[in-house]
Amino acid sequence: MARIAVIGAGMGAMATAARLAVAGHRVTVYERASTHGGSVGRFERDGFAFDTGPGLLHLPAVWRDLFVKTGKEPLERCVELTQVDPASRHVFADGTDVRLPNVSRAGILSSLEAALGPGSGERWGSFLGRARDAWERSRRPLLEEPLPADTSPFSKDPYPALRQGLLRRPARTLGEIGTRELRDPRLAALLGSHATAYGLDPRTAPAAAAVLPYMEQTFGSWYVKGGLRALADAVHERCLARKVEFVLGTAVTRVLEKDGRAVGLELDRGGPVEADIVVSGAPVPSLFENRVVSGDRPAEWPRRRTGGRTARLTVHLALRGGRPADAVHRTVVHAPDPAAEWDAIDAGTTGPRPTVVVMRPDDPLLRPDDDHETVTLTATVPAALSGGRTWAEAAGAAADRMVEAAQAAVPGLRERILWREVRTPDDIRRDTACAAVPAPALAGGSGAFLPVPSTGPLSGLYFAGGWAHPGGGLAHAGMSGALVAGLIVEGADFRGSR
């Protein structure tokens, strides 16, 4: 039985801790905040409650596997999961409005054909077929197996792009797929919004990012009653049931090292902690920036071309008036000029109106009564602003633009607002140590979109969570827990999760 110290109580870290405890190890989690969950947080006021992180769950099979492997009680006995239908609504700059059903390829294609015109559904369907090929080629080696020392095989893009034009050159980026294969600015915007949600510029994201809409439209969108925070609570309870110890309100200031091996932790309160193995679920950039891990940062970080420059601006709205029966859970109100949106992000400004995601959960647990409604708006923004401006100065005007855009999804929104709470990248940085949005691991792009591996620069040090392989997103964080636990329990013989 090894003594294992875990840094952070985020979802990837807790998924690792639960699996290691079941394997017979003594696991203690040290968390700088006063609660668990990491970015999967909660904000409450006046009987209203909001998720401060993701609002929907994709690939729930990842978390079902965790609960099966760590106890007899399955996930559905711990949280109430429902499929969201329609999965999403998209309002485009020209006023076109389309609702996409959940886990129905035929229904999606039919909806696109009806809203966007003849041929649009056929083009999207053909694209999804190629995205499926990319998924099948990359799923196992990229998401379910440890990242190998030689990552050159992932430099080649698995997306079988159509060869078009005089030189027969295939599309190399997600943006080029939209222009050359989908051939409709609204379909291109639909495609690009899946990358933007992860802080990826469609103009530079590799064609392999086509797996993002494929995953969502194939495996569905799910809601957890009480909000995604309820899932974090369930994972925490599972850890406690497996005798994982949590030390909250305690920051790790340094990973202790001896002869090139991690041997424990130095804390901001109390004495040093000895450990046989250290697992860090903290954002990898913060570990090196704050010298928690000594030495130069690994060459692999940060490899993504986003460079940690994007974050999320969130506006929580408490509304008077009940939620209409025909309201859609998630609506994407697309920016009138996606290129200008990303030019502004590159320049470190709030710029023109961004793409805004509007979340309207039909959940009585999140509102004081049926005469009120909770709505959350999110947009991808620069993690830091240029010209010395702070988010405290810019947040109000940016939130106003988001509310204005969201009226396309919620008519009369502005007049219904009782109060609003704006959560900036600085707030996220304060709570989680890093404001930037980690994206899922993607092949292609000469390997520039791969996260750091699960194994750290010291022997006995492992990385879990969204900033490590296989990258960001709630499902990927759960996958990272399975990978790290497998590497620790099975060692060099581990060939990937099953």
Image (cartoon, helix red, strand yellow):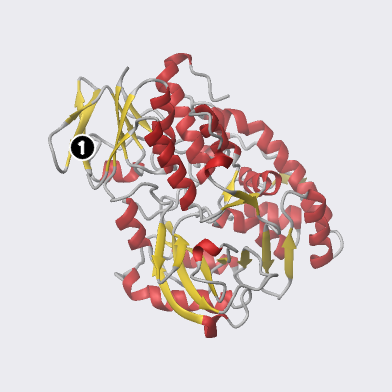
| Quarter of the image that includes the C terminus | top right
Dot 1 amino acid type: Arg
Instruction: Point out the residue furthest to the bottom here.
Output: 415
Residue 20: name its quadrant: top left
Look at the picture and state if 202 lies above or below 242: below
Q: Can you see residue 300?
A: no
Q: What secondary structure is found at the residue carrying circle 1?
A: strand
Residue 377 visible (yes or no): yes
What residue is drawn where x is 54% and y is 79%?
404
Residue nearer the viewer, 47 or 341: 47
Residue 68, percent from left and from top:
55, 30
| Residue at the spot 76% in from the left edge and 59% down from the top edge | 183
Q: Position of residue 134 (x, y in %)?
A: 68, 37
Crowding at mark 1 (Cα within 10 Å: few <14, some 14-19, many 20+): some
Count of numbered marks:
1
Residue 296 in which image quadrant: top left
Residue 3 lies, in percent from the top left, at 28, 23
| Identity of the residue drawn at 28% across and 51% down | 34
Residue at the top extreme? Answer: 493
Residue ranking furthest to the right: 118
Residue 291 coordinates in the image, percent (x, y): 22, 41
Judging depth in this view, the residue of 181 and 285 nearest the camera is: 285
Q: Which residue is mark 1?
A: 254
In the drawing, does residue 35 fall left or right of residue 186? Answer: left
Viewport quadrant of the N terminus: top left
